[in-house]
Image (tube, helix red, strand yellow):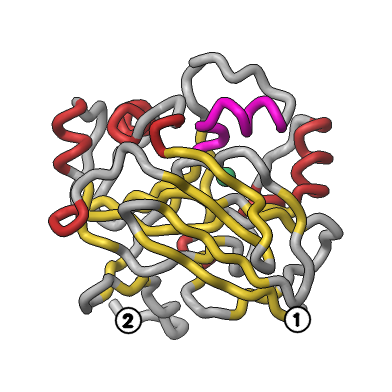
Amino acid sequence: MSFVIDPPPPVAIPVEGGGAFPVRRVYCVGRNYAAHAREMGADPNREPPFFFAKPADALWSAAIVPYPPATQALHHEIELVVALKGGGADLSRDQALAAIYGYAVGIDLTRRDIQDVAKKAGRPWEMAKGFDASGPIGPLHPAAKIGHPAKGAITLAVNGQPRQKGDLADMIWPVPEMLMQLSSLVRLAAGDLIFTGTPEGVGAVAIGDRLDGRIEGVGALSVTIGAKV
Ligand code: MN
């Protein structure tokens, strides 16, 4: 059977050292650091994590990130991103770890004003979280090279000023447990990415701002917010 329109280009992100990782789905954890949960008005106790998604083609690997339309409050959320080489449903802890290909530094860009309205009205988050270029991401670092980082500083600075600072060890749901939870809701598969939540200190950025994210033991990501397109 032939396509009736040209198929959209496949989504892939670069791998440190060469090659590209093809992306199937992009999931995000809604809250996974206690201090950030508190700053957003949530109770940071260990109730099950909740998840949302971004379209795969919202990932953005270029250095200039266009400022999105329809917001006055574009917020940064620095996050550890996990990439899967395998999957399945109802994964055990060992199966979850074995399914991980590698890790990257990502930013879950958020139109906070749209999210605030959605939260109050009980509406979906897609237009707050899944807009074009809402997922800047650095190169993937294979777990075969860096292991499975479970502690280490996760930070983001804007124009050289520290904004976010946390530690991977402060995750309410560490990566393997988070994958166990997510795989009880959907069948995971090779090509899936998961943004694992952000530490405290989220805030707004403006056109021209430079964002420098770093995760100890993983890598770094630097982007500049560009003009609306
Ligand atoms: Mn987030």
At 41% across and 38% down in the image, what residue appears?
A: 168
Q: Name the amino acid type tagged 1.
A: Ala
Tell me the CA gap for discs 1 and 2: 38 Å
Q: Is residue 31 magenta?
A: yes
Q: Which mark is residue 227?
A: 1
**Residue behind label 1 places its C-beta within 8 angstroms of ligand 1:** no
The local crowd at label 1, few if under 14, some if 14 to 19, many if 20 or more residues have their Cα within 10 Å, is: few
Q: Give the percent coordinates (x, y) of residue 205.
A: 75, 62
Residue 95: x and y, percent?
16, 34
Residue 172: say if magenta. no
- Residue designated by label 2: 2
Position of 43 with respect to 111 (left or right) is: left
The amino acid type, in three-letter code, at marker 2 is: Ser
Position above or below: 184 against 106? above
Q: Secondary structure at mark 2?
A: loop
Q: Position of residue 227 (x, y in %)?
A: 75, 81
Q: Residues within 10 Å of mark 2 (few under 14, many from 20)?
A: few
- Residue 127 location in percent, x, y? 70, 53
Relative side of 114 to 10, left or right: right
Q: Which residues are magenta?
A: 29-39
* Quarter of the image with the C terminus in it: bottom right
In which quadrant of the rendered image does the N terminus lie? Answer: bottom left
Q: Nearer the viewer, residue 97 or 149?
A: 149
Residue at the bottom extreme? 6
